[in-house]
Image (tube, rainbow, N blue to C red):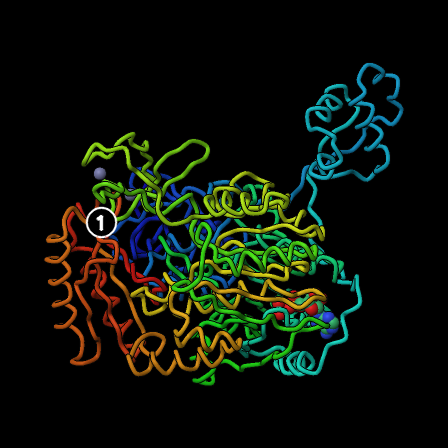
Amino acid sequence: MSHSTESNAPVYRIRVAVPVRLYDFFDYQLSAEHYAQAEVGARVTVSFGRQQLVAVIVEKLPPDAPIDPQFKLKMITELLDDRAILHPSIMSLLRWAAQYYLFPIGEVMHAALPTLLRQAKPYNLLARTWKLLNVHAEDQLKRSVKQQEAYKVLKLHPQGTQETILNLASVETNTLKALEKKGIAHCVLEAKDFTPTPVQLAQMPLTANEEQKKAIQSILKAQKKYQGFLLDGLTGSGKTEVYLQVMQKVLEQGKQVLVLVPEIGLTPQTIHRFQSRFHCQISMLHSGLNDTKRLQAWQYAETGKAAIILGTRSAIFTPIPQLGLIILDEEHDLSFKQQEGFRYHARDVALYRAHLENCPIILGSATPSIESYQLVHQQKLTRLELNQRAGSAVMPKMHLIDLKIARKQHGISEQLITEIKKCLEKKEQVLIFLNRRGYAPVLICESCAWQANCPHCDAHFTVHMKPYMHLHCHHCGTINRIPDACPQCDQSNLKPIGMGTAKVEESLQEIFPDFPVLRVDRDSTSRVGSWQKIYDQIQTSEPVILLGTQMLAKGHHFPYVTLVAILDIDGGLLSVDFRAPERTAQLIIQVSGRSGRGEKKGDVYLQTLRPDHPMLMLLLHHDYRAFAKQTLTDRQTALLPPCRYAILLRCESRSQQENQHFLSEMANLLRQQSEPDLIDIWGPIPAPMERKAGRFQAHLVLLSTDRAKLHFYVRSWWQQVLHSKTAYMKISIDVDPQELN
Ligand code: ADP
Ligand code: ZN
Ligand code: ZN
C-alpha cells in the first residue's frame, strides 16, 4: 500500500533493519500517531517483496527531511512495540557487530531477538492471572478431583495467581478453563511483577587468600568504569570465588551481572555455586531452553528483574538495563566463537560491550588464549594471577610415557594399566581422555591396504559398532554399511585400525572387569539426562573409570579423580594449523586440571611418540605461561594472529578450478584497491579438507597490522565479491577466524 503525499504535508518515516541477507536499511512511512509512539529499537512488521517481515527501527527520520515526491514509500503494516525492546546500548552494539563482522545488519538484529519476538506477535508484559469468582463453590465440584485441587489453590490466593505458577503447581490450564465455564473462576491479564528483589547472600563467602584478595580489590577499584581484566589462575586456584566476591559488591549496588560460560549443560556445578551463594533472580540463557522459557529469561534480564544473567555465547546480546559487570569464564574456549552464519566472537563482543556500557569485564581462564595475552602485552587488559590451588589441593604430578618403547595392551601402555589398577584399588577415580569418538578412525583391508573413505569428502570413514555396525563420516554425516569383503581385492580381511572412545571402552572393560567404565562423548550423552546420570555417579566417591572426549575437559570439578591419562596427543603436535600447539597445550592443562582437586594428590600420564617435544617439556612443569609467552613471540616473528589481524574468505563450488579462478580475480581486485604493502594476501589455497560433502573448498587469507585500514578496504571489496560470485558458489567471510578450514 503506498500513499501519495502532498508537497507541504509532513511525511513520517522510519528506517528499519529487515531480516534479509542484504546490507542496507530500508525506509517506510507511518502515521503521525505511530511516528509519535515509535522508538529506535522497537519492532514493526513491514511488507518486503511479497513477504511480511518483522523489522527493527534503527532511525526515526525527521518529518521535514527532503523527500522526492516521485518516490513513494510503503506504509508499515504494524507497530509491534510501544517502546525499545532492543535498548539503545544493544542497538549500538549490534550496529557495531554487523559492521565489524561484515554481516547483514537485519540478520544480526534478528539473531539478537528471542525466537518468539522474531514473530509478528506483541511483546507481552502481561501475565494470564486466575481469580475465583465464587468462593462457595465446593458443592459444584464433587465429581472432579482435579477441579477441587485447582479450586483449593485459587482459594489460597484471593488476589489471583499467574497461570505459569499454577501450571508449576500441577494445575492444568484445561482444569482452570473448566472452572471458568462453570462461572467459578476467571482469567484476567495483569502486569507481571518485574520489580527487582533485593539480592541476599545465601551463604558466607570463603575467606579469600592473599592472591584472591588482591585480584578482588583491583577489580573493585574499576567499578562504574570500563576496565578489562584477565584473571589468569591455575585450574582449581579459586577463580570462581573471585567472581563471586566481586559480583556480590556489584549486586549490592542494585546492578546486574552478565556471566558467560562455554556450555551450560556441561557445567551444572558452576550454576549451582551461583545459586547457592546468592538469593536472587537468575536468568539462564542457553540452547537447551524452549522458546517460552527463553523469552521469559530474556524478559527478566531486559526488565531488570534478573540480578544475574548466566548464558552461553549468544547471551552477550541480551539487553540488560543495569549492567554493572561482565564475566567470561574459560575465555580460551572455542565455543565462544560462532563458526557459521554470523561469525562473531563473544569474547570480543563482550569487550566492546563493556566499553559501551562503561563497566568492568573479567576474562578468566587457567589457559588464557594467546589473543588475551597479546591484549595484556598491549596494556588493554590488566592481568591478575592466581598461582596456587585454593584450599588444600596441590597441582598434580605430570608423567610422560614414551609410546615408542612402551609395551602396550590395546594401545594402553602397561605402565599406565598398573597405575590405573593401583588407583582403583585405593578406591579413587580415573579419568581417561581421548579426543576421538566412535570405535575406530579407519577401516582398512589387511590384504591390499584399501581404506574405507567417504565418497563425498577427503576423509576416512569412522567405524561405529553401536547401535549397529556402520561407517560414519564425521564431516558430512554420510552413513554406509560395512562391506563383507574388500571392494578392491574381494578378501574378507577388513580391520578397524586405531582407537576411538568406544573401542577403548571395550578394552578397559576387558582389562578391569570389576570396575564401571563411564563413557562421555557426543554419542553416549545424546539422550537428555544421560550426562546428568553419569555426573551424579562421579560425585559419589565410588572408584570408576571415566572415559571421554573434549566434553570432559571443560571446567568440571571431580573431587575424587586422582589419575588422569591422555592416550594420544600426537595428532595435536603434528597438525599444520598454527593454532594447534596452543589448543593442545590448553587441552593438556585443562584435562590435567581435573586431577587431584580434592584432598588427595593427583597424577597425570601423557602417552606420546614425541616425549622430547619442547612444548611437552614446559607443560610437564605446568608452565602454560612460559609456553604462551614463547608462542606469542613465535607469532610475532611469523607475523601471525594476533600479531596481525586476519580475515578469511571461504569459497565453495563445484570444482577447485572454479574456486581458484574466482579467488585469484578477487585477490587482484583487492590488491588494486588497497594501499601497497598494507594487506598481505595468502592464496587462493585449497582448504585443509579440499572436498567436503561433494563440494570443493578453498580460501584467501587477508592479513594486516592495521586493523582499521584492513577493515576499511575489505568492507567495500566484500560487496564486490558478493556481486561477482556465480550462482553455484557459496562464499562467506570470517573476521578474526579461529580455524583455517
Ligand atoms: P577455579 O575456578 O580456579 O578452577 P574454583 O573456584 O573452582 O577454582 O576453586 C577450586 C576449589 O577451591 C573449590 O572447591 C573452592 O570451593 C575452593 N576454594 C576457592 N577459594 C577458596 C578459599 N579462599 N579458601 C578455601 N577454599 C577455596
Ligand atoms: Zn583389499
Ligand atoms: Zn563425508
The image shows residue 53, relative to residue 608, as above or below, that is above
Instruction: Out of 686 and 712, give the one closest to the viewer.
Output: 686
Decide which of 526, 195 is in the foreground and name it.
526
Q: Can you tell me which quadrant of the image ligand 1 is in?
A: bottom right
| Residue 382 horizontal side relative to residue 343, left or right | right
Mark 1 burial class by Cα count in 10 Å: few <14, some 14-19, many 20+: many
**Quarter of the image where the C terminus is located:** bottom left
Q: Position of residue 92 (x, y in %)?
A: 45, 66
Res 101 visible: yes
Q: Is residue 53 left or right of residue 447?
A: right
Task: Mark yes or no: residue 80 visible.
Answer: no
Q: Position of residue 385 (x, y in %)?
A: 59, 80
* Residue 341 percent location from the top left of the image: 35, 53
* Residue drawn at 50 percent across, 65 percent down: 89
Residue 509 figure quarter: top right
Residue 425 location, quadrant:
bottom right
Name the residue: 21% across, 75% down: 680
Residue 679 at what x, y percent from top left?
21, 75
Q: Residue at x 54, y 70 (%)?
A: 398
Which residue is at the front of the view, 629 or 284?
629
Could you say whether the residue bearing mark 1 is in a helix, strand or loop?
strand
- Residue carrying label 1: 691
Vertical arrangement, residue 211 with respect to residue 32, above or below: below
Q: Quadrant of the N terminus?
A: top left
Residue found at the very far top of the displayed protein: 143
